[in-house]
Each structure stands twice: as structure tokens, then as C-alpha cells.
Amino acid sequence: MGGTRLDAVVMAGGLGTRLKMGEKPMVRLLGQPLIGWVVSALRASSVERVFVATTPQVPETTAWVEGQGISVVETPGAGYVPDMISAVEGAGIEGPVLIVMADLPLLRGDILDGILEAYDDVPEPALSVHAPLEIYRRIGAVPDALFNYRGRLIVPSGVNVLLGSAIRSEQEDYHLILDKPEVAVNVNSPEDLTICEAILRGDLLI
């Protein structure tokens, strides 16, 4: 895509019912909310603008984001896909947009830039990031979803690049498979939180 600098939308409307620790984006990891780790990674990347998609169910998250000077786009809380569409349209994004889940605290700016560079090199209008199943076995995590892609078992990471102008349409996507725990661990359970703590403290080698 010619090295276009993209905008990013962080999906942060989840309640985290399995975690049972309040609003999921505000769950603390080493003193910082999960969404704080994601925002830090985006700020360290080449992303142009950051928007955070919230819902009426996460007022603490909305207040935290606004306190950081980040643009909030409130969505109806109708589900991931409808809220994503609402967020991209509400932000007025027509070009490619990086969609990131708020529960990926291991992300780093250089990893996000690597994803954007890969997107520049593919002809497809969209890109989806996946991690191989082997990573989960290595670090003791349990994936939520699993797909067989060309004979390899992969797990969607919650990081995608989509074309904003076609956000209501199904977009052909390039499957980028990264052998990196940083894109593999979505915090969906207390066990996931423990794994992230161990990795960030250096107690679990990756």
C-alpha cells in the first residue's frame, strides 16, 4: 500500500465476564490497565492516529482513555463486528485501518510496524494476524479458536488491517502467521493474566 501510515482502532468495549475483575480493558497488569499496554505499543509504532472504541458498559475505560487525550468512539455494544463497523465509520476512516483488541498487553511498537510493513507488501485489501498453535503449547496458554490453514493449526490474534471504505463488506485477507507470543496471548482468563505477568517479569522465557 505504498507505506501509507494507518490509523488504529482499539476495541475496548468488553466486560471480561470470564475474568470477573470488572471492565476488562481496565484489569491491571503490573500496575497498568490492559488497554494501557496496547496504547503504549501503538504510540511506539508508526500509527498516525489512535481511536478507542468503547460501549456504554465500560465507563471507567472511557474515562481512562479520555484522560489520556485519546479519541473515543462510543459504539452500541451490539457485538464485536457491529461495534467495529460503528467505530471505523464513527472515526471517519476511509483508508486502511489497524484493528487491535484491548486485551493484547504483550504487543510492542516494532511488532505492529512489522505487521504494517507486511501489509504494504501484499495485494489483498485486508490482513489478519495469526499465531501457530505451537506457541500456546510452549507457554501453557489455551487458545479460544483454532483453524486449519493449509495444513497448519493457527489461532487468530485479534490484530487485523482492514479497508475502512469497505468495512461493511467481507474483505479478502492475507493470513500473516507470526511465531511470536506477543501476538498470541489475549487475556481472557486469570491464567492468561498470570502468563503475561510471568513473560513481562522475565520469569517465563519466550
Image (cartoon, rainbow, N blue to C red):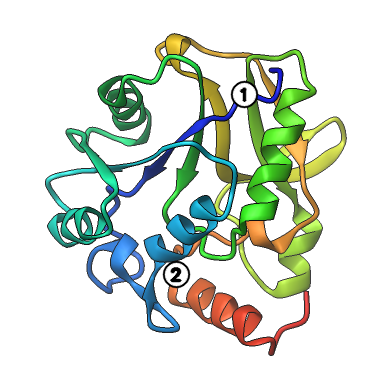
Vertically, is 75 above or below 186?
Answer: above
Name the quadrant containing residue 180: bottom right
Vertically, is 158 above or below 167?
Answer: below
Name the quarter where the C terminus is drawn: bottom right
Numbered disc 1: secondary structure: loop
**Label annotation for residue 106:** none
What distance separates the C-alpha of mark 2 from that of mark 1?
A: 36 Å
Categorize mark 1 by other alpha carbons within 10 Å: few (<14), some (14-19), many (20+). Answer: some
Q: Nearer the viewer, residue 188 or 30?
A: 30
Task: Identify the residue position indicated by label 1 in the image.
Answer: 4
Q: Residue at x 51, y 64 (%)?
A: 105
Name the quadrant containing residue 135: bottom right
Query: From the viewer's perspective, is 140 left or right of 34?
Result: right
Residue 87 percent across, percent down from the top left: 30, 29
User: Is residue 23 in sight in this rendering?
Assistant: yes
User: Is residue 103 in sight in this rendering?
Assistant: no
Task: Identify the residue position indicated by label 2 in the image.
Answer: 189
Query: From the viewer's perspective, is 32 left or right of 20?
Result: right
* Pointer 2 or 1: first along the chain: 1
